[in-house]
Amino acid sequence: MKKLLRILIPIFLGVFFLYLTYKVTSEAERLLIWNYIKSAKVEFIIGAMLFGASADIIRGVRWQLLSKAIGYNSGIITSVASVFMCYASNMAIPRSGEIIRATVLSEYNNIPIGKTFGTIAAERMIDISISILILLSVWILQYEIVIESFLEDNYLYFINNNFWVIMVTLIIVSAILIILILRVKKIKYFFINILEGLFSLIKLKKRLLPFILFSILIWSCYILAFYTIKFSVLELNIIDNKIIFPAFVVGVFSISLSNHGLGVYPLAISLFLANFNINTEIGLTYGWLAWSCQAIITLIFGGLSFFVLPLLKTRS
């Protein structure tokens, strides 16, 4: 039941936010948004898609450094294909992508699945840390913009008022996980492999600098993909460059709420930009173009990966 809920809740959220977007826009506004999207300059759309694809390719290459750190080798095609398969799977079934990616990397490279989970978890930790650093940098460098946009929705007040509830919940969940790990041998062995995957970050040594550079490149490509969208439609030029970076951060943290951010991402971008007198049509146009570029890349390369990778394995 819990697994089913984990799948269904993000889907329902995506549908709900699509419905909400429909309700907050008039027929004339929806027509205008569609006309803006149709008028988008192809060269900038392709540019955004290339930046997005580059980020995912670099992510696959970066994972090879982690696999080598724990004593295993992986082909570049398998490593990159697993990334696109992960994201494509998440679009169809929420939270399934990491399982598929870990399974593919395990089967195609003869690596214990616990260790592939560990390396993927290590990657996730790094990416979460980077996103938090980006959030903090926005907070420090653009303090007034953040205060203006977030305090109105009482996000910070909610965290402050429920701080101890959040902390106690985290402690209880952590305690339950620790007890399960200690009592069940199979789970214990699995988590030991995961820990070894996590410790692959420590084992990087000479590969640490390339890993850091790849991480910077990945996020630079994501930011450039988002920024490039601004030039695709003439009307988007009214958006001040100062709020592009904070808008990107809002988009990053909204993606996890539904299938690859379906419905949530464009609306989150629009609501954020609305705080700076950017009308709904412009905000939704920006959000849908940015989301669509990454979604198209994910579907194309993810589909090819699901089709081509088994063929390569059969030939080998």
Image: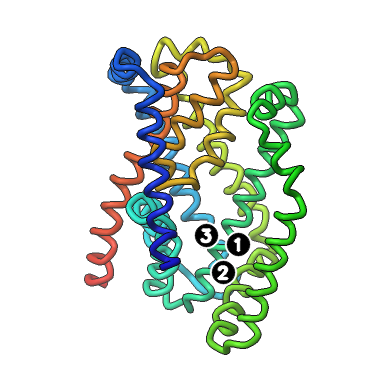
Numbered circle sitting on residue 63: 3
Q: Residue flagged by tag 2: what amino acid is it?
A: Gly
Residue topped by disc 1: 122
For mark 3, give the secondary structure.
Answer: helix
Task: Say which residue appears at 44% left-offset and 31% top-offset.
Answer: 266
Image coords of residue 272 (percent x, y)? 56, 25
Towards the viewer: 138 or 47: 138
Count the labels in the image. 3
The answer for how far apart the CA atoms under marks 1 and 3 are is 10 Å
Task: Say which residue appears at 40% left-offset and 47% top-offset.
Answer: 259
Task: Say which residue appears at 59% left-offset and 19% top-offset.
Answer: 275
- The colour style of the image is rainbow
The quadrant in which the N terminus is found is bottom left
Residue topped by disc 2: 118
Task: Say which residue appears at 38% left-offset and 68% top-offset.
Answer: 104
Left or right of 308, for residue 161 = right
Towards the viewer: 76 or 251: 251
First in sequence: mark 2 vs mark 3: 3
First in sequence: mark 1 vs mark 3: 3
Q: Residue flagged by tag 1: what amino acid is it?
A: Ala
Left or right of 240, for residue 305 = left
Residue 174 visible in the displayed image:
yes
Disc 1 vs disc 2: Cβ atoms closer than 8 Å? yes
For mark 2, give the secondary structure.
Answer: helix
Q: Residues within 10 Å of mark 2 (few under 14, many from 20)?
A: many
Compared with residue 219, is residue 99 higher up or lower down, i.e. above or below?
below
The answer for how far apart the CA atoms under marks 1 and 2 are is 6 Å
The quadrant in which the C terminus is found is bottom left
Q: Residues within 10 Å of mark 1 (few under 14, many from 20)?
A: many
